Amino acid sequence: MNIAFFLVPKEDVIYLSPNSTMRQALERMEYHRYSAVPLIDDAGKYAGTITEGDLLWKLKREPQIGFDHTHKVLLKDVAQHVEIKPVRIDQQMEDLILLATNQNYVPVIDDNEVFIGIIRRREIIDYCFKLWQAEQKV
């Protein structure tokens, strides 16, 4: 099966720039109730994922920032502690499933490493469940 079938296109994905601020990340994550958001650079390339934990660790390690100064800290200056690996759009379903076992979503890039969307783990689980159900009926 082609993994493009599961793709949530970039225009439907909430993402941030590495040049966004911690405050922007916190506000967007709170509004959408996300614990992680992909970072997309000015060239449209996937630049990693910022998580709530990354933001909290930054505040813990640099208490002088405080919440009142999060508008001054760029996300590119916040260490990413979890590596969310992307897949290429032409990769096989097996590659996708292996990554999704450890990630809530899998970023998808094209041949030029440009971000084109994500595949959420829940769609992969649903697909696998339907395959299992079909197999049980045989």
Image (tube, helix red, strand yellow):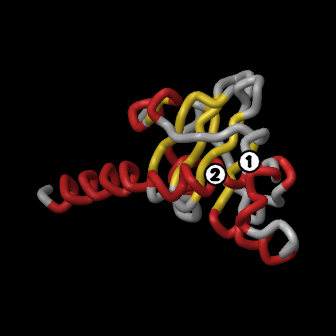
Figure quadrant of the N terminus: top left
| Residue 21 image label | 1
Neighbourhood count class around disc 2 (C-alpha, 10 Å): few under 14, some 14–19, many 20 upward: many
Q: In the displayed structure, would residue 98 be above or below residue 87?
A: below
Q: Is residue 51 left or right of residue 103?
A: right
Provide residue 9's location: percent of width, then percent of height: 47, 29
Q: Secondary structure at mark 2?
A: helix
Q: Are marks 2 and 1 in contact (CB under 8 Å)?
A: yes
| Residue 25 image label | 2
Q: State the CA–CA distance, disc 2 to disc 1.
A: 6 Å
- The amino acid beneath tag 2 is Ala
Viewer-closest of 27 and 3: 27
Q: Residue at x 82, y 57 (%)?
A: 78
Q: Secondary structure at mark 1?
A: loop
Farthest left residue in view: 137
Provide residue 46's location: percent of width, then percent of height: 71, 37
Q: Residue at x 73, y 63 (%)?
A: 68
- The amino acid beneath tag 1 is Thr
Q: In the displayed structure, would residue 90 be above or below residue 132?
A: above
Neighbourhood count class around disc 1 (C-alpha, 10 Å): few under 14, some 14–19, many 20 upward: many
